Image (cartoon, rainbow, N blue to C red):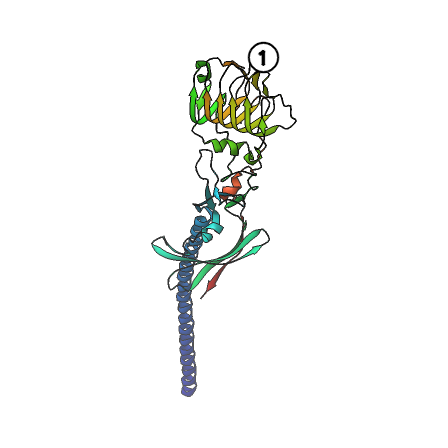
Amino acid sequence: MNTCLRNEKGAALLLTLFIIVFVGIVGASLINTTLYGQKNTVTSVAEQDEFYKLETGLDFMLHEMATFSIEDGILMYDDGVNAPYPVEDENGNPQKIVKRGPYYYIETGQPLNVTYEIDNQEVEVSVSYEHEVIGEETEYTYKVIAQFPNSKFERSLDMIVRVPVKSELIEIPPPPPGHVGPQKPPKFPGNNGDLIIYTDKHNIHRDDWKSISVKRNSTFQSFIDYYELDTSKATTVWNGVPKPSNNSVRYYSLIKASGNEVGIAIQPGHLTYAKNVEISGCGSSGSVTIHGVLIAENIDIGGNCKYILSGGIIAKDFTQRSNATTLEVDPNGGFDEDGGADGYEPPPREIPTIKDSDYNWGLNTHFEITNMETNRK
């Protein structure tokens, strides 16, 4: 009997010890699991915080690249003959080139490694790239990486930027024969309403001639260039005898007249160039009529002569010698703002119109993010 009781007590003791040990093991396991879970939760929150800060660093760099803008270079004309020369803006200043966007951020040598401070932590952002020319476009492939110093992971993105191949040179046709110096966009060197223009010297006797004559600070050559005249063609002499012509532009080395039956007439819609004009008289029945444009290096007129002016005159040196010279002026005559006069219009220009995209580079940029990922180191 006693032996049986001792056996039952021993079994109960072993069972109790087993239960205690089992509960201890389970309790320790639960405590360890709880502590590990808490640790993981803390780690997860910390990594999530890092993730958002790295994402912010990428956003900062992308914004800096996308909004980048810098004035870099001058837009130039290239006529294939003269050295390139500046395109002028509406104020007459050299037209600056403005480069914008992520492509020109790289192309102009901006920083590729930048550190941003985000919530009192430094985020290092680096940019690497490759580029190639594809047809008429340049393509840049970027990789942008954001990371903390000594961090276990990094956030990165890949993107592609394509822009048209640009040049600071605007190609224009070569200058016309006889042209000296660079071509410029057409701008008449005189003023609207001018009747007689001289660029260097003048000697005018009559007040009615003085009142319609004006000195312009432009050079005589600037007028030659504006009308695209080939002065090498000025080889013949016009002696004052009426000489009709179907050519809208005529060239003479000398226009000379003296005596009766002088009939010099520049018809409407015509331009006449002469190296020298020497008229000492027209007689009682002669006259000089200028409907279109007369351009001459030296004009020397005098004597008894009747002048009828409804076009315009341009001279380097202008002399009107005699008080006997009479003048009739068309109140609607003179040059217009483009240098035309009484039906004559300057030749059309082939210099192209400057577009906004010619000097605002980066307006037609193609920008695409192709991949974003988080990598553990």
Percent coordinates x, y for residue 325 in the rendering? 49, 14
Q: Amino acid at mark 1?
A: Ser
Residue 186 can be seen, yes or no: no
Residue 317, position in %: x, y? 45, 26
In the image, farthest residue toward the right? 246
Q: Nearer the viewer, residue 248 or 102?
A: 248
Q: Residues within 10 Å of mark 1 (few under 14, many from 20)?
A: few
Q: Position of residue 205 (x, y in %)?
A: 43, 16
Q: Nearer the viewer, residue 314 or 370?
A: 314
Between residue 238 and residue 347, name the one nearer to us.
Answer: 238
Q: Residue furthest front?
A: 259
Tally the marks: 1
Element type where label 1 sits in the image: loop
| Residue 133 appears in the rendering | yes
- Residue reaching furthest left? 120
Q: Is residue 36 above or below residue 196?
A: below
Q: Is residue 141 above or below residue 79?
A: below
Residue tagged 1: 285
| Residue at x-position 47% and y-position 31% | 220
Pinpoint residue 60: horizontal percent, then vertical percent.
42, 50
Q: Quadrant of the N terminus?
A: bottom left
Q: Is residue 124 above or below residue 169?
A: below
Instruction: Name the quadrant containing residue 377.
Output: bottom left
Image side of residue 60 versus residue 242, left or right: left
**Of 28 and 183, which appears nearest the observer?**
183
